Amino acid sequence: MSGGSSTAGARRPVGAPPSVAVVDYGMGNLASVAKALERVGAGVRVVDAAAGLKGADALVLPGVGAFRDAAARLEATGLGPAVVERIAAGVPFLGVCLGLQLLFDSSGEGGRWTGLGVLGGTVERLETGLKVPHMGWNEVTWAAAGAGMACGLPAPAAFYFVHSYAARPADDDVIAATAEYGGSVVAAVARDNVWAVQFHPEKSSATGLALLSNFVGLAQEKWR
Amino acid sequence: MLSKRVIPCLDVRGGRVVKGVNFIDFRDAGDPVELAAFYDSEGADEIVFLDITASHEGREIIADLAARCAEQVFIPFTIGGGLRREEDVRAILAAGADKVTMNTAAVEDPELVRRCADRFGSQCIVVAIDAKRVTEAMPGVGLRWEVYLHGGRTPTGIDAEAWAVQAAELGAGEFMLTSMDRDGTCDGYDLELTRTVARAVDVPVIASGGVGTLEHLAEGLTAGEADAVLAASIFHYGTFSIAQAKEFLAARGIPVRR
């Protein structure tokens, strides 16, 4: 645990692990992602109120379930606006699965629902001609934006996916990785301090832990 | 492209592995979580735990297993055995399991599959089918298989292929298909059974029962048309490692994660 600094990381004691706030907005089990972050050296706090995000060196937004419910809970709890504010303040951010999709302007999952709007673009149902959900281990191809995530990972890197919807960024430059599944599927996006992955690094064995370790390293660099 | 999956299966009773593993030094060879972490490090794609505890108290022990596994194992894991109610499924998933398997309860109350799929998502509902060949097929009728319950002791008269189709319509996200004729033998999967069900449903099929060699794993994925292969004893007894299995499959041109 990082000894409770009042502003993002600025007063973190030398040598303390970066404190990572895992955002708990009632969408799915957070134990796996929290434990995986601990495994790679983060001090993890599960945070269910906007005020709790303040002192964290980095944020992780996990989530499984329906986009509409997730967006509604983020709004109702105030966690959504707080996450957006922290991202704007430069705090390293990692979205996982639904946590990636929520970054975009909107999703077409069962209607049309507004997301956090951190990245331009929408989330749409996979139309691959193959089985949906896209479930299982798939290799990704990294793009330039994925250099930080991919650092030191085995090549090719395979991750565990479970999803029926995928991001369609307005700006192709934010695409950090793609996977082949009846066409090219956005597997990861990145822009500045914002990283997000459609797959589950916490379920992707040593390769997933290595990616999480890169993220914790990003947080460490940021507040050094 | 999606990899074909190699899945070691651990039988668990009272929170302990039934058949211990003795080819490598473990602090506790009976601890399912330590074994699962070992298989993760070896390259297993998923882990399946089958709980053969037949008691109510067993539910709490298995939820504890799920919670400990979620802390120490960083690949997807599935828990099955004796889950009879929606609430049992909720508890196991909330404890950290990625998927559950249902067998007897699904046959006795098919709507349970629908309710669980609606509530938790199809991707975490695996229907396990134990099937046995019907030996005296009628003339003109192809090979048939009958669904058995209670670990293969109770015949149902239900056709395995028809049940798979029905369960998929109800929302089953995956099938774990065990040949009762082959289970415990080392003669290989019942490839006709696996292929028949794999062609009948459009969700993944895990082949199970009978693996004795690496060739059997390859056959399950090629001639059997399965999406994943499950095995127990060849891995537990150290006959082959997961890495050897992956290497063998890759050499056959089968896409696997390495």
Image (tube, coloured by chain):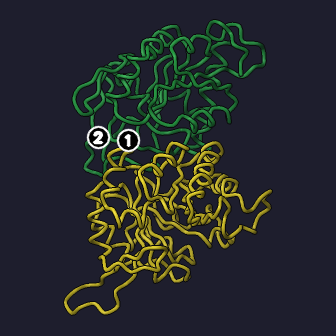
Q: Colour of chain A?
A: green
Q: Position of residue B107 (x, y in %)?
A: 35, 67
Q: In the picture, which chain is yellow? A: B
At x 41%, y 62%, the residue is B227
If the image is split into quadrants, where does the C terminus of chain B sit? bottom right
Residue type highlighted by circle 2: Leu
Residue at numbered disc 2:
A126
Q: Position of residue A188 (x, y in %)?
A: 44, 32
Residue type highlighted by circle 1: His
Residue at numbered disc 1:
A163
Left/right placement of residue A200 relative to residue A114 reads right
* Residue A152 seen: no
In the figure, B101 relative to B231: above or below?
A: above
Q: Are marks 1 and 2 in contact (CB under 8 Å)?
A: yes
- Residue situated in front as seen by the camera: B72 or A89: B72
- Residue situated in front as seen by the camera: A76 or A138: A76
Q: Chain of mark 1?
A: A
Nearer to us of marks 1 and 2 is 1
Left/right placement of residue A126 relative to residue B35 reads left
- Residue situated in front as seen by the camera: B245 or B171: B171
Q: Which mark is residue B224?
A: none
**Dot 1 and dot 2 within a common chain:** yes
Q: Residues within 10 Å of mark 2 (few under 14, many from 20)?
A: many
Q: CA distance from mark 1 to mark 2?
A: 8 Å
Q: Position of residue A19 (x, y in %)?
A: 65, 20
In primary-sequence order, the first of circles 1 and 2 is: 2
* Residue A11 seen: yes
At x 51%, y 26%, the residue is A24
In the figure, B70 relative to B179: above or below?
A: above
